[in-house]
Amino acid sequence: ISLSRVIDQMLSQAMIIHRQDSQAKELLDLREVAVEILEESDHDGTAGSTQVNLILPDTEIPVLGDFLSLTEAGKNLLTNALAHGRGPIRLGVENDGLAKLWVADRGAGPPDEILQRLGERYAGAATSSSGHGLGLSIAKSVAESHGGTLTHKRDPSGFRFSIDIPAARST
């Protein structure tokens, strides 16, 4: 991981911590957050040659949230999948009682020792030369600031991280 990426992640984490205390939540459609994540990833070169499939339902997924923080958290999950996962990468949202912003790939996911320390800053530094654990820390912090959790699932089809937050009523 480049020094500039680490610095960007540290600044992103500081900004998100500040926004948690100062930014009022707004009614958002989580589908729009997913589109923004994909658009920003295409512009900064993180998508590279790996295909990212966007999976969106036809109906809105309303949440009370901070658009910028949710976008940053999702970008970190997508960047991790692009760097460490196996394509195709899928980015999507769904509502199964909780609104979920998720990234999935066909890889095995992080080692168990990272998952056990999920969201701790620098949890990945000791086990990986290509990551420092800041991205997952940011994603976990954003999920919690929205009254939710950062979850993960490993099965024969691959690995998935999901930011699960309460759904809101649409207006």
Image (cartoon, grey):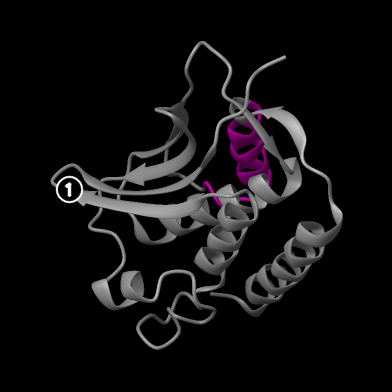
Q: Is residue 24 above or below residue 14?
A: above
Q: Quadrant of residue 60?
A: top right
The percent coordinates of residue 69 (x first, y second) are: 70, 51
Question: Is 68 a magenta residue?
Answer: no
Q: Nearer the viewer, residue 147 or 136?
A: 147
For the point 32% across and 74% down, the residue is: 116
The percent coordinates of residue 148 (x first, y second) are: 53, 49
Magenta-highlighted residues: 32-47
Residue topped by disc 1: 155
Q: Is residue 74 above or below residue 22?
A: above
Q: Is residue 133 left or right of residue 11?
A: left
The amino acid marked with disc number 1 is: Asp
The percent coordinates of residue 47 (x first, y second) are: 52, 46
Main secondary structure type of the part rendered in magenta? helix
Q: Quadrant of the C terminus?
A: top right
The percent coordinates of residue 102 (x first, y second) are: 45, 41
Q: Nearer the viewer, residue 22 or 11?
A: 22
Residue 54 seen anywhere in this rendered image of the structure: no
Q: Is residue 67 left or right of residue 168?
A: right
- Residue lying furthest bottom: 126
